[in-house]
Image: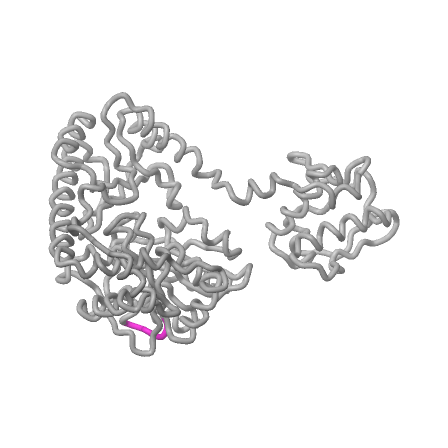
Amino acid sequence: MLEATTKGSGRMLNWSHLPAIKPKYLAITQFIKQAIQNGDLLPGQRLPAERELATLLHVDRSTVTRALLDLAAVGILVKKRGSGTFVAQLPHVNQLANKVNWQAFLENTTATRHATYQRKLAKARTTATVPLIDAAANELPTNLIPQLGTLTLDWQGFLTAQQQEERTGYLPLMQTINRYHTARQQFTLDRQSLIITGGAQQALLLILNSLLQPGDAVAFVTPSYFSASAVFSAAGVRAYTIPTTTLGLDLTALETAIIKHRIKLLILNPTLQNPTGRILPLAERQAILALCQRYQVAIVEDDVFGWLVDRDIAVPPFKALAPDNVIYISSLSKLLGSSTRIGWVVAPQAIGERIRQVQKNLDLVPSLLAQVMADHALNSPEFSLGVTQLTTQLAQRRQNVTAILRQLRPDWHFVTPLGGFYLWVTQADRNVFEHLLEQHLLVTPGPIYGADRSAFRFNFAGLDYRQQRLLIQRLS
């Protein structure tokens, strides 16, 4: 068991007596400065290891790391690779208040793990001298987005629309969304709140900020696009990944994580999951719900791909199975393009009121004009036909591309999804991203989704007949 004291200049330094300062990393920096000034820490003295300090101080290791980086940046401490952290020989204790450690900001906001991949993709798109096959795109190509005719709105109509704006969004749009969910026999809004947001990511950020405190824990399945999301660090919460097995989500691993890390929210993308394209079957959804209900873990259901599922194969959303235990998110981004920036949350009324208040406080209410345009789009006579045509075109491209891959790359393993526009491929080459890049074929590498380098996501939506012929040439 670790002692809460270390020996300095003949006196014992009690690390558990931090000053009452928040955030905690500032309390640690102040404590170390005071210890140096008092002679409790001497020039050249080695500090306990970061993990040990985190235990002594009853804080996360990341909090200790931030404090030591700040002190090292101004010459109070010296970090030596492989040796540890030491008090500087001539520590300048008074400099910390005058010098900001900008590097700490950069380290906290830069996704260094994925930056190299993104730079390579961006460079390929801007410097290519031959036709690219861009299977790394995140969304539909423009020519597949449903054509909804001319959407007109005069100024007087917009002024009238302002009179229909409620606290939680534009009333006609909320009524349209309610009709959509009811018509698809998904769920009703009885005893629920519907809140319009600026997209699904903003919806998730609002939920995290409304329900959690910094340091609280959430979990999500891996591989997942949540691995590349910045919302968890923005909200100051800890995120843990739950692996999948051949049978689906590893319920044993989920239960272990819930107990060990005190998981508050389980975040799922259960319908045409990104990147795998998997639809969780009803039995698996019920098993997950039962486990979460046993430990009082709420579920956040991200259903942005629900538009692209045929009703004949649709599985009831988590929200329909347990409306009081689930917060539901959807958006128009995967249907009408990411620039639409309109999403929504359906939550139990008390939770919805909290989310609405946070949204107001953070001034994250989406543009009324965007809401009016979204409502016009959803009520357009061409909308239903456009969605039907889109799913038909995607199904044809999925069939053609998977046939090409199975013939020319039999060592690529994937399960053909029942909708959406992603394939999740695994194979043996750990440098497959670079090798395909050399062939001017762009894919999204597995590490972005929390997987290893031998996996990748392949977006087939943009591969029309010409691109399919090009794919055959590149892979032959």
Residue 359 can be seen in this image = yes
Check the image and name the residue furthest to the bottom: 191
Check the image and name the residue furthest to the front: 156
Q: Quadrant of the C terminus?
A: top left
Check the image and name the residue furthest to the top: 129
Magenta region: which residues? 321-325
Q: Nearer the viewer, residue 466 or 57?
A: 466
Q: Nearer the viewer, residue 380 or 281?
A: 380
- Identify the main secondary structure in magenta: loop
Q: Is residue 79 left or right of residue 173?
A: right
Q: Nearer the viewer, residue 53 or 474?
A: 474
Asked if residue 190 is positioned above or below residue 438 in the image, the reply reads: below
- Quadrant position of residue 424: top left
Q: Nearer the viewer, residue 108 or 417?
A: 108
Asked if residue 3 is positioned above or below residue 348 in the image, the reply reads: above
Taking the magenta stretch, the answer to whether it contains residue 322 is yes
- Quadrant position of residue 349: bottom left
Which residue is drawn at the image coordinates 45% and 63% (left, top)? 359
Which residue is drawn at the image coordinates 36% and 49% (left, top)? 225
Q: Is residue 345 left or right of residue 7?
A: left
Q: Is residue 53 left or right of residue 303?
A: right
Residue 259 can be seen in this image = no
Q: How is the image coloured?
A: one colour
Position in image of residue 475 (x %, y %):
20, 28
Position in image of residue 56 (x %, y %):
69, 56
Q: Quadrant of the N terminus?
A: bottom right
User: How many numbered marks, from 0 up?
Assistant: 0
Position in image of residue 173 (x %, y %):
27, 65
Taking the magenta stretch, the answer to whether it contains residue 153 is no
Which residue is drawn at the image coordinates 38% and 54% (left, top)? 201
Position in image of residue 366 (x %, y %):
38, 58
